[in-house]
Image (tube, grey):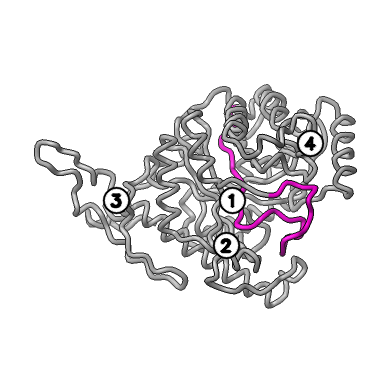
Amino acid sequence: MSHPSPLHLAVALDGAGWHPAAWREPGARPERLFTAGYWAGLVTEAERGLLDFVTIEDSLGPQSADPAAPDDRTDQVRGRLDAVLVASRVAPLTRHIGLVPTVVTTHTEPFHISKAIATLDYVSAGRAGVRVQVSARPDEAAHFGRRELPSIRPEEWDTPAGQELSAELLAEAADYVEAVRRLWDSWEDDAEIRDVSTGRFIDRDKLHYIDFEGAHFSVKGPSITPRPPQGQPLVSALAHQSLPYRLVGGSADIGFVTPHDTGQARAAVDEIRAAQDAAGRAGERLHVFADLVVFLDTEQAAAEDRKARLDGLAESPYTSDAEVFTGTPAQLADLLTAWQRAGLSGFRLRPGVLGHDLAQITRGLAPELRRRGAFRDAYEADTLRGLLGLARPANRYAAARAGGAPQS
């Protein structure tokens, strides 16, 4: 089957899987969820399938069946390891796959995160990214005591109060990303001299105060970590509607969207491209991936039966913000290649049960796409930017010092 261009594939790692009863499946290994070996095994399996990157979910409060508040359930996985630290632990065990931990911008500081992701880029030799996420939950705000957030139910996000809070949190996230990007550039690439004979380790003229003053942050800089190997690690964000589409268009390298058909995929891509143009980024390459939750088996009936069994354990049918696909790898390949024509760069797949569906992706879906000429035969680059066809950006402060326009 002819194909316009090779697809990019990522997987989203979360606990035992995206179905709330995934931890109860045979092979789920719930006793190992909080071990380094568990996460190393998942990421090395994803790399075995030649996937572009993994994202690692995180939050600042326990998981909850209620999106706006904690719950009292004891029959679902609760508790997480820190996503950035997990990625740093796994990085030396892999060679090619990108590592994209989730960071909540609402209650953390740009300076700390810029340093953490720059360090991850060094530890992984240029394979780091970050998924920025906002938090509107009052219980998470209470962990930090710096601000109070109103309680907004999901059905209230389209009200004036909901839109106002969403706009505030996303504007803060945009400021956050801008401060982080400037900190990554605050050391020029050749700022380190390391000349033992002269006793000069750095050229102080090539370290820069970023002097970032925004509505939400004031950051002096420079960073204490030299410029990352990729120059700028990849920034990504999940977006469901217009306001977060603007964050993706103005601030991200990768946007994750949640269409349920080709028409919705095309509409999301068009809106993000318009936001990108409005932000003055028309000449930059920005990837748009669609998210899907997947339950895969060699026979469609087996996949359907497995999901039904999990739904029974959870005592309710599983639903998601993203499309839920239940079927075979070949059927999923049909859907992905059809949806790609809507302008998508690739797909981020959320395995329903990691212990089962991840291997179905790496050993079933990826070879099927490869047979169709729609997926790589081997890793073609050693950095995440290289895998996604993104050039290493020039340092904005070096360009300004040389008399050119600062790079955004």
What numbered label is drawn on residue 295? 4
Give the amino acid type for the residue marked by disc 3 in the picture. Trp
The residue that disc 1 covers is: 255
N-terminal of the pair, mark 4 or mark 2, is 2
Q: Residues within 10 Å of mark 2 (few under 14, many from 20)?
A: many
Q: CA distance from mark 3 to mark 2?
A: 29 Å
Mark 1 vs 2: CB contact within 8 A: no
The residue that disc 2 covers is: 246
Q: Position of residue 86 (x, y in %)?
A: 54, 41
Whether residue 337 is visible to the viewer of this picture, yes or no, is no
Q: Nearer the viewer, mark 3 or mark 2?
A: 3
Q: Position of residue 159 (x, y in %)?
A: 72, 75
Residue 110's place in the image compared with 297, above or below, is below
Mark 1 vs 3: CB contact within 8 A: no
Q: Quadrant of the C terminus?
A: bottom left
The residue that disc 3 covers is: 187
Write the residue at 51% across / 43% down.
Answer: 85
Left or right relative to 341: residue 331: right
N-terminal of the pair, mark 4 or mark 3, is 3
Give the amino acid type for the residue marked by disc 1 in the picture. Gly
What numbered label is drawn on residue 14? none
Q: Residues within 10 Å of mark 1 (few under 14, many from 20)?
A: many
Q: Which residues are magenta?
A: 50-78
